[in-house]
Image (tube, rainbow, N blue to C red):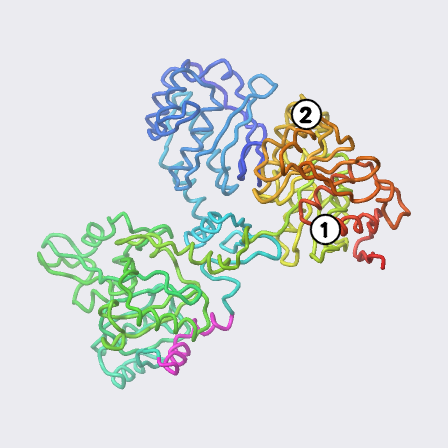
Amino acid sequence: MAKFNDIQLLRINHLRGPNIWTYRPALEVWLDLGALEDYPSNTLPGFNERLTAWLPALIEHHCGVGERGGFLERLQEGTWCGHVLEHIVIELLNLAGMPTGFGQTRSTSVRGVYRMVFRAREEQVARVALAQGHRLIMAAINDEPFDVAAAVALVRTEVDDRYLGPSTACIVTAAGDRGIPHVRLNDGNLVQLGYGASQRRIWTAESEYTSAIAEGIASDKDLTKSLLKSCGVPVPEGQVVDSPAEAWEAAQDIGLPVVVKPSNGNHGRGVTLDLRKQADIEAAWYVAEPEGREVMVERFIPGDEHRLLVVGGKVVAAARGELVSITGNGRSSVAELIDSQLNSDPRRGHEEEYPLELIDARNGTAVLLELKRQDLTPDSIPAAGRQVVVQRNGNVAVDCTDDVHPEVAYIAQLAARVVGLDIAGIDMVAQDISKPLHAQGGAIVEVNAGPGLLMHLKPAVGAPRPVGQAIAEHLFPSEDGQAEPGRIPVVGVAGTRGSSTIARLVAWMLHLGGRFTGLACREGMFMNERCVDTRDSAHWAGARRLLMSQMVQAAVIENDARAILRDGLAYDRCTVGVVTDMDGMQDLAEFDIHEQEQMTRVLRTQVDVVLESGAAVLNAAEPQVADLARLCDGDVILYATDPDLPVVVAHRASEQGRAVLVRGGNVVLATGSSEKSLGALSRLTFGRGETPAPDPLTLLAAIGAAWALDIAPDLIAAGIKTFEPELPTAGSPRTSTLPL
């Protein structure tokens, strides 16, 4: 069989926000099939068989058929290779642990050229999946070998390196379930939840409420114990030591058995428990010393290790640790038994997604010390039936949330308050957590800032706990009564006719209403009427700057068709979406826009994202724009200079149908059959009457947006009359005031 040339990837575009395909970020790929345009899947010998052998889970892809096996049915009937590549990429992402269900492939006006799009939670991960999928499909077409496992491993590595860690991801997901948007602020786990002044920031399981002082206290275990003890919280007696000899002296003072650990370590690293011999204690010092600033010796508390998660003063989850051991068979070495009995557990792995870590029998210092205490090495062969302890701590993965005694919960909550942490991992040793702590001689051994959440999300035993929801609730309490937590009023203005003036006028009205308002438009970027950037800011990056500012209490953002096609919208939802027109088709040929009807698909994006509690403001004089009303989740406000337009009359026939109209020379706000005059159109001029108002439709659109924002009619009128249409220079404040 003749070899086919590679499918050409002509252009790859990361759509970072809501776009013509989906509400979510996506990777859009323009590809040219070349000669393969004449060869659907059922005409390529052996192609379907090779593909399904490499990726058997393709049977789960429903595709357009809408049921399991739908995509395989399309393969057998014959589908084009762009569509096949879409499903290959999605399956590689699924196999790499980033489930992806959305994808589409559509032909363009050029024969053999297609636009393929799929969900892209992280751009670089999506690009690697695309590259591997491209290699795989060409290998399947040309009957060449391909290592699927290696391809999946490459994508998975990219996921592990670039995507949010499991603790951060669970909080972001929980916030998203409540409609709270998020913005990733770095390549790690620093994330903004919400927009503008309503945002909260998290860094893994730390929040902006986590004070640096509290974190500093928690990192100093000796200081933490001192503060807890002074408040009546039971803690083990202990001393900081500077050498193995001092460790042995301290152990004798405290009384055997003891624990040796780093003063500021975490995750159980460098901790050795239940030490009774001088040699073991001195050896444990060398295990602890590299893991922290200082080494501590503490009284050993008998019982099991527990981790209680305290969020906002409440215990929301608890997990118990278990002593890890192996059983000898008289044939296998300790190292072999660890691999066969422990590391074979699917719950163990090096990545963060695993609740238990793999155990290194030969290089794990703590493991080697534990074996030495039992007169064993990794190569020793334990007798059949002999129990060998491998680890005594660091295996907290058994959920016990429902067993926590109220007194135990109170002490954990008190410990978090004493240290000052809003989110804390309380390490406690107790024989039975369902009984009072004091009665059993239990104690708190550590208080941790930024605790890992995986043990509660994926316990080895027991039910997962909704800790992400608890943290989201802590940051955005339901009792605040905010209908859309984490959100500020966002106004999106899409179109070409007067859109900059509309955006600037609405921003001015919001400013007069007392909100610190950010504006991103073609004329630049403005913060509370101060020009901070004179460059065109009507694009994704400009808008994103507003939404990331903690000062901004309301944002007005100008968009056009090109910005939507190139980047998508910068916000997931908006309070008000204005669409003025569907002009500009002639400048969008590079996006394969050639017919006026295609503009609906582009500009509807602005209406699609309007919140249920918000409103779309639409130009009723443009039928293609007015028709977008049916797509809006929220209210609709039409605007027109002709109050008798059939679309306006029909809209007002609904009792709550709203419109901004001109009747008898007056601007009126109409709700159903009732009308309220805003004043004569001729008197609604800019700059205290010195500058004529713009085209009436531009003015009506701004009035409609302000009305949708519940700005009072008197303030709307005053805002129009005091609006200064000339642009301020960079750095100069706008100082217009209302007339007395």
Disc assigned to residue 712: 1
Q: Is residue 15 visible?
A: no
Q: Which residue was labeled with disc 2?
A: 589
Q: Is residue 465 above or below residue 599?
A: below
Q: Is residue 590 found left or right of 723 in the rendered image? A: left
Q: Is residue 401 left or right of residue 329?
A: right
Q: Residue at x 47, y 21 (%)?
A: 81
Up/down of 280 relative to 136, above or below: below
Residue 250 appearing in the image: yes
Quadrant of the drawing holding the C terminus = bottom right
Cα–Cα span, label 1 and label 2: 43 Å
Q: Which residues are magenta?
A: 212-232
Q: Secondary structure at mark 1?
A: loop
Where is residue 649? Give x, y as percent.
69, 29
Q: Earlier in the sequence, mark 1 or mark 2?
A: 2
Q: Nearer the viewer, residue 433 or 522?
A: 433
The single residue placed furthest to the front in the displayed view is 673
On the image, the x and y values in percent for residue 179 come to 51, 47
SS assignment at label 2: helix
